[in-house]
Amino acid sequence: MRFQDIYGQEELKAHMQTAIQKNKVSHAYLITGERGMGKKMIADAFASAILCEKKTGEACEECRSCHQMQGHNHPDVIYVTHEKPNTISVQDIRDQVNGAVAIKPYQSEKKIIIMDEAEKMNEAAQNALLKTIEEPPEYCVIMLLSVNRESLLPTIRSRCVHMEMQPLRTEVMIKSLMEKMGLPDYEAEDCSRFAAGNLGKAIRFASSEDFNEMRERVLRIGRKLKDMELYEVTDEAVSSEIYSRDQAVEFYEMLSIWLRDVLLYKATGDEARLMFIREKTYIRRFAERSSYFGLEKAIEEVQKAKKMLRANVNYTTTTEILLNTIRES
């Protein structure tokens, strides 16, 4: 993995490359960002560049170290794993981090520890890691990857260089989806807008038939909601195509995006910022027939419906009440 293979994150990549070129790589980094934003990719690219024998700030992909990184078998790179799905335990830290750090690198100048899902460390594990971060050997580089910076102890955060992954521009994501997945421009644009700067999420949307089906369902309802009878709208929303509560929550979330588009257009008239940009004609009509207060109340009711659904309230009843509120907005 090379920096040049990663879309966006230019400031973060430049910082890492400069640190390598000036021989000022820190002993600990905290890389944060939403799931799917490429934290693991950036950590791999950084590790590859640090260990590359040419020391240019970018992996050459020709030296022995780069070949080992490509094969995921470099002896001086350790990926922390954990048996319990939701917990990184103190024993995991002692065995895979503290124990490994005590041994000098086998062939490189640095030994690199990469811990994904660092937010899963319990307090005892974090305290065990803290001792290593406080007094690390010169050859050690620890990279903590996390979706939630605040889940880590302040004492750990203060000893790490914090680097936050930034959302990608929509045009960058569209280009990536068209090049990597062969999507037509309109489909790449839809997935990119809904992913809100998260390329991993956009790729998941592009690969999901459920996403496309749910989007079309919301569009059918949004186009006719003001004109259809309530029972017709409800039948569309609770049809057998929704099999699980997760899918129902996804339906509510997408319905919320439609309503936010309507409210945004009503407030600003700015079509360029719409998520459902190809539905601007219907969104404009919906906005003209709705009030600010009604739209704001409808968006609040969607959030309440999501919470009720998680509390095992009946989906059909909840949805019927919700859709009636939206019709009257």
Image (spheres, rainbow, N blue to C red):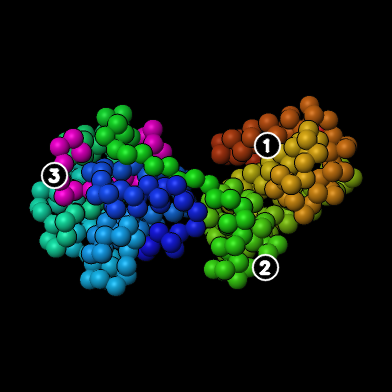
Q: Is residue 144 magenta?
A: yes
Numbered tag placed on residue 9 in the rendering: none
Between the residue at mark 1 and the residue at mark 3, the CA separation in whole angstroms equals 52 Å
User: Mark 1: which secondary structure?
Assistant: helix
Measuring from the top left, give residue 62's x and y in whole percent. Answer: 29, 73
* Disc 2 residue crowd, few under 14, some 14–19, many 20+, Cα 10 Å: few
- Quadrant location, the C terminus: top right
For label 3, the residue is: 137
Residue tagged by mark 1?
A: 302
Horizontal relation, residue 157 to residue 173: left or right: left
Ranked by sequence position, the earlier of labels 1 and 3 is 3
Kindly identify the residue that appears in the image at 61 percent across and 59 percent down: 174
Using the rendered image of the protein, determine whether residue 231 is visible from the camera's viewpoint: no
Mark nearer the viewer, 1 or 3: 3
Using the rendered image of the protein, determine whether residue 57 is visible from the camera's viewpoint.
yes
Between 33 and 323, the one lying in front of the other is: 33
**Residue at x 67%, y 56% (from the top left corner):** 190
The outermost residue toward the left is 103
In the figure, is residue 315 to the left or right of 223? Answer: left
Is residue 189 left or right of 106 when viewed as pictured?
Answer: right
Q: Which residue is mark 2?
A: 184
Percent x, y for residue 162? 36, 39
Q: At label 1, which amino acid type do we have?
A: Val
Rendered residue at 78%/35% (across/down): 268
Q: What secondary structure is marked by label 2?
A: loop
